[in-house]
């Protein structure tokens, strides 16, 4: 398990040449797959700014390792527009507010979103319905 | 996931898709001819100076009416403004300002607002009434359940005399009153819950 706030700022290093591409600035979630679709880098060359999750070899405590510069430059298969989750308001599918997202936990191997943390309680990543410019939409608490 | 809301409170509420995009704001709520049900919403744009939108939201396209937003599956459910206005009646059902009479011919006051169920039903469960001095010497606003046997027109609202026993002074206590009234089954029964000092039954 890893948090978005821990992953941000990590250097991104290639596994084959050990060269630094840049630092993680954003993690873009694809709400349909409830997983991280790509990383956005800062301080990177233009062709390396978007790193598809399939190019990521591992996400560790101190760095993100990508397979190779070539794998990154090939580009992600699909890169959904970045929608920030952290700091965003949460709405249930029934139109009730549920605070704002304080942080997001994800599986560093699969990239799956595990938990959305809000001041009003934790929300399982399974409940994620949509992530738009206005709100994060989640299924209502089954309880 | 149901609660109660005043129709006027729905105005300005954001219309949000399940993918998290805000597409419009509620401008007006449209009711059917008998003001029994919401048939749709007219919309306005979201900007400060945005005017009315050409497209409207039929109630069939609503996922849920919530306390913070009206949720829709996607923008595809929006329809031409005329389609919503034609299938429905008028905004606010034409009843706001209409006098409220009991079936015994006593005037209680005038309609100030409609009380609707939130969630997926769109049902009108009652009316907010500005009580006249005869019904309530303090002329408070009271809530009256819609009931089953009531007649509504643009000119007046006739409520069973029994309904006037189920008034509530605020919306949270009104939810219980509606249930009590409906549980009674047959309007005109003898169960009564008069207003006490706090206005709660």
Image: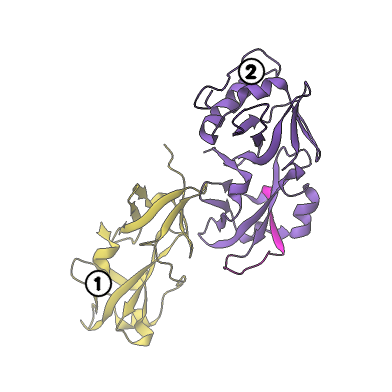
Chain colours: A yellow, B purple
Residue A6 falls within the magenta-colored stretch: no
- Where's residue B24, x and y in %? 60, 61
Local secondary structure at mark 1: strand
- Where's residue B163, x and y in %? 67, 24
User: Is B45 in front, or is A1?
Assistant: B45
User: Is B43 in front, or is A17?
Assistant: B43
Q: Chain of mark 1?
A: A
Q: Extreme bottom residue here?
A: A45
Q: Residue at x 62, y 33 (%)?
A: B139
- Where's residue A129, x and y in %? 48, 54
User: Is B150 in front, or is B67?
Assistant: B150
Q: Do the residues bearing badges 2 and 1 touch, measured as CB atoms within 8 Å?
A: no
Main secondary structure type of the part rendered in magenta: loop
Q: Which residues are magenta?
A: B46-60
Q: Is residue A127 above or below residue A67?
A: above
Quarter the C terminus of chain B occupies: top right
Q: Extreme left residue here?
A: A62
Q: Is residue A87 above or below residue A138?
A: below
Q: Chain of mark 2?
A: B
Q: Residue at x 52, y 46 (%)?
A: B67
Left or right, B161 with respect to A4, comes to right
Residue labelled with disc 2: B184
- Where's residue A112, x and y in %? 35, 58
Q: Which mark is nearer the camera, 2 or 1?
A: 2
Q: Residue at x 57, y 26 (%)?
A: B177
Is residue A100 visible in the rendered structure shown here? yes
Left or right, B35 with respect to B118, comes to right
Q: Residue at x 54, y 46 (%)?
A: B66
Give the image quarter of residue B158.
top right
Residue labelled with disc 1: A64
Give the image quarter of residue B189.
top right
> 10 Å neighbourhood of mark 1: few (<14), some, or many (≥20)?
many
């Amino acid at each position: 398990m890893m948090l978005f706030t821990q992953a941000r700022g990590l250097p991104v290093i290639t596994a084959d040449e050990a060269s630094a591409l840049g630092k993680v600035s954003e993690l873009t979630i694809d709400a349909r797959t409830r997983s991280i679709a790509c990383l956005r880098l800062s301080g990177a060359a233009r062709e390396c700014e978007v790193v598809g999750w399939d190019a990521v070899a591992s996400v560790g405590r101190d760095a993100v390792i990508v397979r190779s510069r070539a794998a990154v430059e090939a580009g992600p298969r699909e890169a959904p527009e970045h929608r920030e989750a952290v700091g965003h308001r949460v709405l249930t599918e029934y139109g009730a507010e549920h605070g704002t997202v304080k942080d997001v936990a994800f599986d560093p191997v699969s990239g799956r979103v595990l938990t959305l943390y809000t001041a009003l309680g934790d929300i399982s990543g399974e409940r994620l319905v949509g992530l738009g410019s206005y709100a994060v939409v989640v299924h209502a608490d089954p309880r | 996931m149901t609660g109660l809301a005043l129709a006027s409170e729905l105005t300005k509420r954001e219309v949000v898709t399940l993918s998290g995009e805000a597409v419009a704001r509620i401008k007006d709520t449209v009711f059917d001819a008998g003001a029994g049900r919401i048939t749709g919403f007219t919309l306005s744009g979201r900007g400060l100076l945005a005017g009315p939108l050409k497209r409207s939201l039929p109630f069939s396209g609503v996922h849920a009416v919530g306390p913070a937003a009206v949720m829709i599956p996607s923008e595809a459910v929006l329809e031409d403004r005329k389609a919503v206005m034609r299938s429905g009646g008028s905004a606010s059902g034409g009843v706001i300002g209409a006098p409220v009479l009991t079936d015994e011919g006593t005037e209680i006051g005038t309609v100030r607002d409609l009380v609707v169920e939130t969630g997926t039903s769109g049902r009108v469960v009652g009316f907010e009434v500005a009580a006249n001095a005869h019904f309530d010497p303090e002329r408070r606003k009271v809530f009256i359940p819609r009931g089953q046997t009531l007649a509504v027109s643009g000119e007046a609202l006739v409520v069973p005399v029994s309904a006037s026993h189920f008034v509530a002074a605020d919306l949270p206590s009104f939810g219980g009153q509606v249930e009590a009234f409906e549980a009674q089954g047959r309007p005109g029964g003898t169960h009564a819950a008069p207003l006490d000092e706090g206005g709660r039954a």
